[in-house]
Image (cartoon, helix red, strand yellow):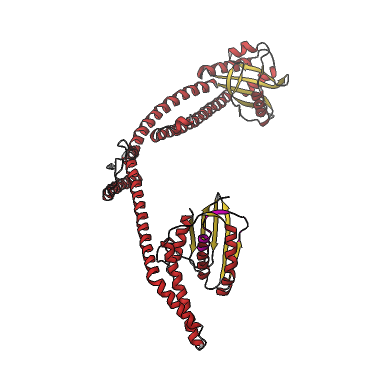
């Protein structure tokens, strides 16, 4: 049942739940109306029987009643007179009313004797004793009327003669003692008859009302849901690649705004996929796509082909750039390196001359250092140009990192008062060239040390996670913006005053040759974290 309801359309769900709500409210209203009408009917009968009891009581002679009670048994003129009066009252009032006079004397704890009544059915049933044994409800009300000396109305009760509501009215003698009780009954079965008629009337009325409400509700919901149905049809059309769909419903409601936004979306989709087709033609991309595919799936496939084509073009451009840099590096090595070697040799000879002053020697020492720096730059260029001729072997990463940390600890402490912390305990292995891995780690660690101009801590960690080796180098330096991070590894981009960016570019290239990658996280003013990730070989 739940599955059936869940699979219904939005319109049918709305109709179903709104109908259930209407029916529930109708049933509640029907029950309330029934109870209210039932209570009113009972109150009406009760008031009627109270009026009749007062009327009968005023019609009877109190002296005749007292005399009839004193006579106990037998026939006396007063008793006959009372019965005549009762018969006259019966003739004047409906047949569902009956009256009698009972003594207050108890028979067998809860029975009372009827001394006067004109009801033949009671006489035939109770003669000759005329003792009436009422139920608990009757006896409780009888006792209350006797004690409180006022009219008491019973609730609805049943006895051998029918279903009744009774008014018990005490008759008091001159000394204030209750000598008899006048009982006036009204047939309460009329209430049940009335209730049945009431139920039938209410059911018929509410059925007609429900039918009218449901018809109006169905008509209103159909008008209300028609824009939503149009929207659903439009979405289905778009999902099949029909982007020229236009919804017609226009107003200032929420659905009207949704329709407007939907039309704007389809216009933009038309423009987007038109641009995809133009781009495809511009790139001269040939696609072997099935003609059975719908428009949007086909367009997405074309986008994937275009993206792959663009990626290949970027790779080609990168390869061309690397080739150009390689050619430049070869030219630099040929044209500059040999003259620089000669110049450096003569400077070293001058440095050994004892006749030079300290100032002259410091100048020569500075020139030699600059020549060394120029050679380092040329070496970086040559690293880009030379092919990878190394044989890849298994490398113990723990040994590499430990030796590099020992090598750089003194340099870092003396440079900017930087402490290097090592978190590496497990021996893990990667495949590649040990010298190239040392070159990459040394380059990144030196960059981290140089980024911490006011001192700090360089943390180096070695971990194994999900079949990969993670080498993490974290500094507390100046950090970088996201734009700067994205440009790392590109040619001639450096954040250092005298840097060329070639060192980091070579590092990225060497890591890629080892089937690894470099991930960088950085926050300006807080530091950077370089993570080298390689496949693990254990």
Residue 293 % position (x, y): 32, 37
The residue under the point 26% across, 50% down is 282
In the image, taking residue 150 as reference, residue 487 lies left or right, namely left
Residue 265 image position (x, y, % from top left): 32, 47
Residue projecting furthest to the right? 108
Q: Is residue 438 above or below residue 110?
A: below
Q: State left or right for residue 115 relative to residue 16.
A: right
**In the rendered image, is residue 528 in sight?**
no
Residue 476: quarter of image: bottom right
262 horizontally vs 518: left or right:
left
User: What range of the chain is rendered magenta?
Assistant: 423-439
Based on the picture, tell me whether residue 427 belongs to the magenta stretch: yes
**Residue 126 percent location from the top left of the image:** 65, 13
- Residue pictured at 50% horizontal, 60% vertical: 436
- 495 vs 79, nearest the viewer: 495
For residue 359, say whether it is visible.
yes
506 over 230 or under it: above or below:
below
């Amino acid at each position: 049942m739940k599955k059936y309801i869940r699979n219904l359309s939005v319109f049918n769900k709305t109709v179903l739940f709104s109908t259930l709500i209407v029916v529930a409210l109708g049933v509640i209203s029907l029950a309330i109306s029934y109870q209210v009408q039932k209570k009113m009917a009972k109150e009406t009968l009760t008031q009627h029987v109270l009026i009749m009891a007062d009327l009968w009581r005023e019609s009877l002679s109190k002296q005749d009643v007292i005399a009839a009670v004193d006579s106990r048994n037998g026939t006396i003129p007063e008793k006959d007179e009372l019965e005549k009066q009762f018969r006259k009252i019966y003739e004047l009032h409906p047949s569902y009313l009956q009256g009698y006079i009972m003594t207050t004397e108890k028979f067998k704890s809860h029975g009372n004797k009827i001394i006067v009544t004109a009801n033949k059915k009671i006489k035939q049933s109770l003669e000759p004793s005329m003792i009436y044994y009422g139920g608990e409800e009757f006896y409780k009300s009888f006792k209350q009327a006797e004690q409180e000396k006022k009219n008491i109305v019973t609730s609805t009760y049943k006895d051998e003669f029918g279903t009744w509501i009774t008014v018990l009215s005490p008759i008091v003698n001159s000394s204030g003692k209750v000598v008899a009780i006048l009982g006036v009954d009204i047939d309460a079965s009329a209430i049940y008859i009335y209730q049945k008629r009431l139920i039938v009337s209410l059911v018929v009325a509410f059925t007609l009302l429900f039918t009218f409400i449901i018809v109006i509700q169905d008509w209103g919901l159909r008008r209300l849901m028609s824009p939503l149905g149009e929207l659903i049809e439009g979405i289905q059309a778009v999902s099949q690649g029909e982007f020229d769909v236009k919804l017609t419903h226009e107003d200032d409601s929420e659905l009207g705004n949704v329709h407007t936004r939907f039309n704007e979306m389809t216009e933009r989709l038309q423009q987007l996929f038109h641009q995809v087709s133009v781009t495809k033609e511009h790139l001269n991309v040939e696609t072997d796509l099935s003609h059975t595919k719908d428009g949007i799936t086909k367009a997405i496939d074309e986008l994937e082909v275009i993206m792959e084509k663009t990626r290949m073009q970027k790779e080609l451009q990168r390869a061309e750039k690397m080739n150009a840099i390689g050619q430049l590096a070869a030219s630099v090595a040929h044209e500059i390196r040999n003259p620089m070697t000669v110049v450096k040799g003569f400077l070293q000879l001058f440095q050994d001359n004892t006749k030079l002053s300290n100032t002259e020697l410091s100048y020569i020492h500075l020139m030699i250092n600059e020549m060394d720096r120029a050679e380092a730059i040329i070496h970086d260029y040559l690293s880009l140009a030379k092919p990878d001729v190394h044989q890849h072997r298994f490398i113990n990463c723990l040994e590499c990192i430990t030796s590099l940390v020992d090598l750089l600890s003194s340099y870092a402490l003396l440079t900017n008062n930087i402490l290097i912390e090592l978190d590496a305990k497990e021996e893990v292995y990667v495949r590649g060239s040990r010298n190239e891995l040392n070159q990459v780690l040394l380059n990144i660690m030196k960059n981290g040390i140089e980024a911490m101009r006011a001192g700090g801590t360089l943390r180096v960690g070695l971990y194994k996670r999900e079949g990969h080796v993670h080498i993490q180098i974290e500094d507390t330096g100046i950090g970088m913006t996201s734009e700067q991070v994205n440009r790392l590894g590109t040619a001639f981009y450096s954040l250092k005053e005298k840097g060329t960016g070639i060192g980091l570019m070579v590092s990225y290239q060497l890591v890629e040759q080892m089937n690894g990658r470099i991930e960088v996280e950085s926050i300006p003013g807080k530091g950077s974290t370089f993570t080298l990730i390689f496949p693990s070989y254990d």
